[in-house]
Image: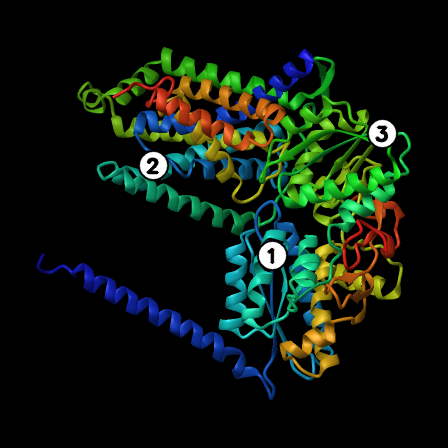
Amino acid sequence: MAGRISRRRFIKKGLAAAGGVVALGTAIDRLGPALYAQTKPPIRIGAQGILSGPYGGYGEFGRQGGLLAVEEINHNGGILGREVEIRFRDEELKPPITVSNLRYFVQDWGADVAIGIDASNDVLAAAEVMPQLDRVLIVHHAATEKLNEIDVYQKHNQYVFRVCVPVYQDGIASALIAKDFHHVKRWATISPDYEYGYTCWKFFRQVLSHFRPDVQYVGEAWCKFNTADFAPYISKVMAQKPEGIFSTQWGGEAVAFVRQAKRFGVFQNIGAMMIGMGAAMDVLEGLGAEYPDGVWASCRYWFRYPETERNKAFVERYHKRWGHYPSYPSEMMYSCVNTAKAAMEKAHSTKTADLIAALQGMELDTPAGKRLFRAEDHQAVYPVPWGQITHDPAYPMPIIANLKVSPTTEYYRWPPFTKLFGV
Amino acid sequence: MVQNLLFQGLVGLTGAMYLWLIAAGLTLIFGVLRVLNFAHGSLYMLGAYFALSASLWMHQGFWPALAVAAVGVGVLGVLLEVVFVRPIYRLAIAYQLLLTFAFVLIFNDAVKMVWGPLYQAPPMPAGLGGSVVVLGRPYPVYNLFILLAGVVVAAALWLVFDLTPWGRAVRAAASDREMAAALGVNVPRLFSQVFGVGAGLAGLGGALTVPMQTVSPGMGENVVVDAFVVVVIGGLGNLWGAFVGALLVGLLQAYGTLFVPVFDLALAFIVMAAVLIWRPAGLFGRSG
């Protein structure tokens, strides 16, 4: 064994070297911004979303919206006279990764506020650690109603706010439209095999049956996560001869689902198809000319609604900056940053307790319209339309037209959440 | 009712052919080289990306894109075998697993760097985008084409391995590589070729998914798990076992969705466990 490094010594050396590299990295990380900061330290925003895989479009659109907001704010003098820094990390659709991103942001990088998060499982895990990290989390996209109704309202988790409409948009606003499809009496679903899929279908059936006791539910197909071949599900549901299909597939799976459904003749054989997140920009761009006309689709912000100067200016700046139209997570992340800014300016502080007090009941003018952050459940309230897919030569992708907007008093659930819908 | 059952079966057969195309290369490489190639799913993913690039960047049609994917990934497979796999044949099997798993990570990141992290959905090939009425209901022409492609690949493999001198040499090397070498077969070269063929099959399988599905980093990881189940059920290293295993798992997935939807994910694994208890070497595997 002479001449060889012993295992123990090898490990010791390796650890020492690794430790040195990490320490150096951290030092540069900490020192770097300080070198060019003029007088006050920057305000740091830690953002995350799904940045890879079939759902990666969501994180990417969010990243673009967040960056645009930060660029605009810094161009106009920052927040409270301080420069804003933003960092993005991939939540990878994994709750432990989401939580470790938050720890990194707060404990290693020194973030003043956390924003983002695309997936519901991830956001519920994140909500649990926010009190311990003592930072406000402003959620941009994850839409589970459990966040506002249970975590915030029932369990009094004060640290979490959300800018986007929850699953009320997918499950309740949809049913308020479907109730007027008098020719469609047999409904079925092809949706994701997890919480989001089940909750939306449950809301949809309850609200629809309230108005339309004549409606039947004839089939359900629950597609496992990362489904690539939707044929078994489509075939199963179509065997029941439904007249309407309600789907909450999203991202790349929505694209694959629609492409395959088309070849199974689904669209010729049913009277209505509703896809909750079917008007997300990645789905519109992914399907392009293949998106069948007339499909009912929605999202959590539609770039042509509302027709205000504020919204038009945002869309124009976004298009100029990134070369395509904003998807809904773009506006959500943009509004997260601006919500943090408004709260800090209202409170004249970046302290977590002050921000919470400022955010509760705050009203904010955003591209998606006037958002009211309910004090009871920290949920932003603003209306989002449903519409029908159409191909307009003025746009490089399909858009939704024939917009239907229900009043928020009708389709949001309201504290104490004992009634399904309405006030 | 019967028509609907048969229709679901047809759907299952198409699913089976997708599985067969990826399982074939996996089991071939194991059967001959005794290498359990974790990176097989990554080769499948690369096949999809090669086909995508051929149609989007080089503006090639569907058929040239398939060829680019199969040949491109096949050549990559040969390089992998010669440079990385060959030096570790003599070592414990754990080294192969580590090596091929490392390539899963490397290929995933490489794909993100070259093609970006987002999914892509290229257009449908002309002539295969429609549907025809089968058993009274519309069925995608493309899915029928996949059925045909699976059968053609199976027939081609049968012809090559049973009827050509090369196929006989491969079988000889698979059953006893020292004896084959003693009889004058250039075993190392043969191994590289087989690895290339296996990789090429994965590439072809990936390329065939492109028109109906979406292409994204990590897409191979989900599929390769199913492919492993198929291969284990059929008997590791047995091509016909993989074909039968794919049929079994494809039909199980289709009928599982229909009859036991709460359970459909677990169904294939339960069957795999049952097969392993009843015949530890798989349905067509040689015991011992």
Q: Which of the 4 image quarters holds residue B186?
A: top left
Q: Secondary structure at mark 1?
A: helix
The amino acid type of the residue labelled 1 equals Leu
Dots 3, 2 in contact, CB < 8 A: no
Q: Secondary structure at mark 2?
A: helix
Report the chain holding disc 1: A
Of the two numbered discs 1 and 3 on the same chain, state the one appearing first in sequence. Answer: 1
Quick one: A264 or B118, which is closer to the camera? A264
Is residue B88 left or right of A408 when viewed as pictured?
left
On the image, the x and y values in percent for residue B217 come to 54, 45
On the image, the x and y values in percent for residue A161 come to 69, 65
The 10 Å Cα crowd at callout 3, few under 14, some 14 to 19, many 20 or more, is some
The label nearer to you, 3 versus 2, is: 3
Quick one: A237 or A226, which is closer to the camera? A237
Q: Which of the 4 image quarters holds residue B28?
A: top left
The label nearer to you, 1 versus 2, is: 1
Numbered disc total: 3
On the image, the x and y values in percent for residue B66 come to 55, 29
Quick one: A180 or A116, which is closer to the camera? A180
Quarter containing the N terminus of chain B:
top right
The 10 Å Cα crowd at callout 1, few under 14, some 14 to 19, many 20 or more, is some
Q: In whole angstroms, how far apart are the C-alphas of marks 3 and 2?
A: 59 Å
Residue denoted by label 3: A185
Is residue A348 left or right of B237 when viewed as pictured?
right
Report the chain holding disc 3: A
Q: Which residue is at a point 76% across and 68% down the rendered structure image? A: A375
Residue denoted by label 2: B81
Residue denoted by label 1: A124
The amino acid type of the residue labelled 2 equals Glu
Quick one: B28 or B167, which is closer to the camera? B28
The amino acid type of the residue labelled 3 equals Lys
